[in-house]
Amino acid sequence: MKENSFVSADEIRSAFSAAMSVMYREEVPAYGTLMKLVAKVNTETLAADTMLRDRLEATDSLDRISEERHGAIRLGTPAELSMMRRVFAVMGMYPVGYYDLSTAGVPVHSTAFRPVGDAALKRNPFRVFTSLLRLELIADEALRAEAEAILRERRIFTAGAIELTEKAERDGGLDKADAERFVAEVLETFRWHDKANVSGDMYKRLHDAHRLIADVVSFKGPHINHLTPRTLDIDKVQALMPECGIAPKAVVEGPPTRKCAILLRQTSFKALEEPVSFRDGEGAWKTGSHTARFGEIEQRGIALTPKGRSLYDRLLDGSRKIVRPAADGSNAKQYEAALAQAFGAFPDSWAEIREAGLGYFSYSLTNKGRQTKLAGRRDIDTLIADGLVAFDPIVYEDFLPVSAAGIFQSNLGDGAQQEFVASPNQKRFEADLGVAVLNEFDHYAGIEQASIESCLQALSAAMAAE
Ligand code: OOG
Ligand code: NI
């Protein structure tokens, strides 16, 4: 049967993530250096923390970590965004969440394309933070119209990528040969082009309006602007980066260092200044430079419930009222101290986090649980108290708007701060995307609930089998 010869979406996504990593290592050598450093720190962390290692192994999450990464792109038009959604769907990646970056002075709004569901995430959790430029936030109407005209002309997908996406949609999948071709064709969209689409003058006008506009409009495609490996100890990597010749941004974004990692902590190194050529009349080129691509690392902790998330937001906000991290790093120490103090109010043991309903957990049977048979259903708290069920944090798979703003800003340069009126427009984003974004909380709750059900079922199945 035809369907039997289809390659799974998970497999295509893994192949794509691997191909992207190879391409980016060639394009940005510092990314390769960072990958090596992260691998070393992860190995050391696992060797020193056998408990962490055991739990990752028990929850079938150890293998994914060394292969884990996210990337980011910035698109120019609604048509590009909706086609990108169809391309990612072939790889089992769906838009989760809505992020408004206008509050941070960046004229984009975004979503994260990522796998959903426990099995797909365990196979390969590759995600792409995908932003859409909002030219309507730019005051200069003439420039806006010119930028729109330039974007309208460009084609960011190869004919092969479009054809294979349509084929996958029509047939319900791709066979091995098509899947390989699909990965190669789609990779082209993310490639760096050192020949700009515009003249030096146009680039300068776009750049003067906002650096990000120049980055999106001036080039043939949405070059991948960073690829981020996951580390198990971000403080250690941050401290070791200078030794490897990489200068990290001043502060780590997100929550402070804790025993129980929550949500997401991220740090990046500054964008590289790269030589590019601008159009200079018929067939002629003029050299210049552009800064776009950078490196980033992240440490992922537990996914928080709406209650946990609002506590997180409140504490982060509170600490920023005391000290706001300066772009030049001059108050990094004070900021870290204020952050650590504010987060004293967030419980720091898995049991307390669970009892307070602040985080999502995955439940599984203990050895004792596997040998136990029960008549009737018990609630999960009783099963835990009786030592039959264990709980592990569910990893946060998404992003954080304040952190994303910090990452964007550290790469836009200190002089690029610009104020926009906060103008989230999720409806417009979803209309451009072609579907509604998925709600991250529903997905974590679903994974948690499924793990509870499978424990309860196994305990009663054990009884039935007797
Ligand atoms: C995306 C910045 C946000 C993250 O990890 O929060 C981001 C961009 O610069 O395009 O990647
Ligand atoms: Ni990122």
Image (cartoon, rainbow, N blue to C red):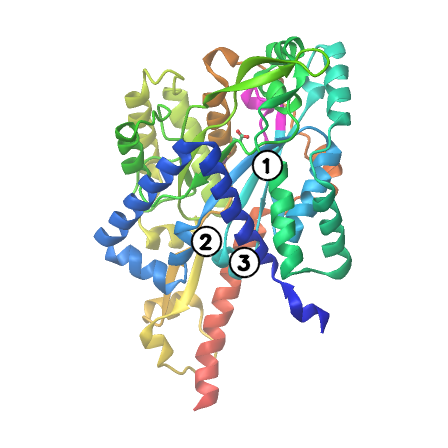
Quarter placement of the C terminus: bottom left
User: 300 above or below 255?
Assistant: below
Question: Hey, which quadrant is residue 272 in on the image?
Answer: top left
Q: Residues within 10 Å of mark 3 (few under 14, many from 20)?
A: some
Instruction: Let me know if residue 264 is in the magenta part.
Output: no
Q: Which mark is residue 120?
A: 3
- Residue 126's spot in the image, x, y percent? 52, 48
Q: Residues within 10 Å of mark 1 (few under 14, many from 20)?
A: many
Residue denoted by label 1: 190
- Residue 175's spot in the image, x, y percent? 66, 62
The residue type indicated by label 2 comes to Tyr
CA–CA distance in space, label 1 to label 3: 23 Å
User: 324 above or below 233?
Assistant: above
Q: Confirm whether residue 91 shows in the render.
A: no
Q: Nearer the viewer, residue 106 or 259?
A: 106
Q: Nearer the viewer, residue 367 or 464?
A: 367
Q: Which mark is residue 421?
A: none
- Badge nearest the viewer, 1 or 2: 1
252 left or right of 448 in image: left
Instruction: Let me know if residue 99 is in the magenta part.
Output: yes
Question: Hey, which quadrant is residue 391 in on the image?
Answer: bottom left
CA–CA distance in space, label 2 to label 3: 18 Å
- Badge nearest the viewer, 1 or 3: 1
Question: Hey, which quadrant is residue 210 in on the image?
Answer: top right
CA–CA distance in space, label 1 to label 2: 34 Å
- Residue 114's spot in the image, x, y percent? 57, 48
Do callouts 1 and 2 mark residues in contact (Cβ within 8 Å)? no
The residue type indicated by label 3 comes to Ala
Residue denoted by label 2: 360
Q: Nearer the viewer, residue 257 or 184?
A: 184
